[in-house]
Image (cartoon, rainbow, N blue to C red):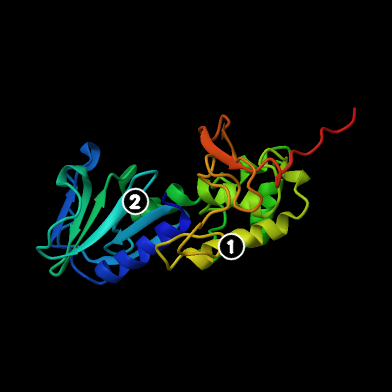
Amino acid sequence: MPEGDTVWRAARELNAALAGRTLTRCDIRVPRFATVDLTGETVQDVVARGKHLLIRVGGDDGWIVHSHLLMEGIWHIYATGAKWRRPAFKARCILATSDATAVGFELGFLKILPRSAEEEAVGYLGPDLLGPGWDPEEALRRLLSQPDRPIGLALLDQRNLAGIGNVYRCELCFLAGVHPLTPVAGVRDLPRMVALAKKLLEANKARSTRTTTGNLRGDTLWVYGREHRGCLRCGTRVTLEQLGDNELELRDLYYCPYCQPASPAPAE
């Protein structure tokens, strides 16, 4: 599942293949932008902003190919003339140079924006866990700005800190021993939780196998996806529910009811 580490790695690979090179082909297979042709322009760089990927083309008055992988999206890079590993009808964006072709398959979101619109497009995001401007104090401030919001929702909100997806949300709550419905203000050591988020994404950003257990060959996750196998720590059956609100759509939520007991209701 694409999260901040996946997008960081995609940006690094795309930047290595495209940055500084002139586009010889530009094929945008999204109706709204199908007439856009950036052929002849030079790719400046490719960067990740949380779970957003920005391909900057041309100079300061150029363009941005702005994509988001959502659930199924992926970028592939091929040598010129190489056979694609996915069917062509799933391609949404094709950018080629003289020696490489980048193909975005099943991109959940794709727009072509003027460079001047970059801040408007992604400026709302909170501190980027894998970005050069990571600011844990600002992330804490944003989380605590809604003290009554469940931590399981606050962590997913990219306006608080950018890069956490559903897998990390569930695993972070488990590792912190926090029930995901606990209000933000009730999390005993929120700074440690934010620091752990940074540590996990940094540890996983350069490898294809994501792990929160430290195991790369066996069980890589503590609770996520383990509703039929049980908590990896205690064996208790993992609870699978759905959690969302008016700002975030319903997403699967995994937690161990033994290792992450619900907080008692306050006395009236």
Residue 186 appears in the rendering: yes
Q: Which residue is mark 1?
A: 198
The amino acid beneath tag 1 is: Lys
Residue visible at 51% across and 58% down in the picture: 220
Q: Quadrant of residue 33?
A: top left
Residue 131 appears in the rendering: no
Task: Please provide percent x and percent y for residue 55.
Answer: 32, 59
Residue visible at 90% across and 27% down in the picture: 268
Q: Is residue 98 left or right of residue 7?
A: left
Q: Which residue is mark 2?
A: 66
Q: Residue furthest right?
A: 268
The amino acid beneath tag 2 is: His
* Label 2, label 1: how far apart the Cα atoms are: 24 Å
Image: 71 above or below 46: above
Mark 2 or mark 1, earlier in chain: 2
Image: 113 above or below 96: above
Q: Residues within 10 Å of mark 1 (few under 14, many from 20)?
A: some
Mark number displayed over residue 87: none
Image: 76 above or below 149: below
Q: Secondary structure at mark 1?
A: helix
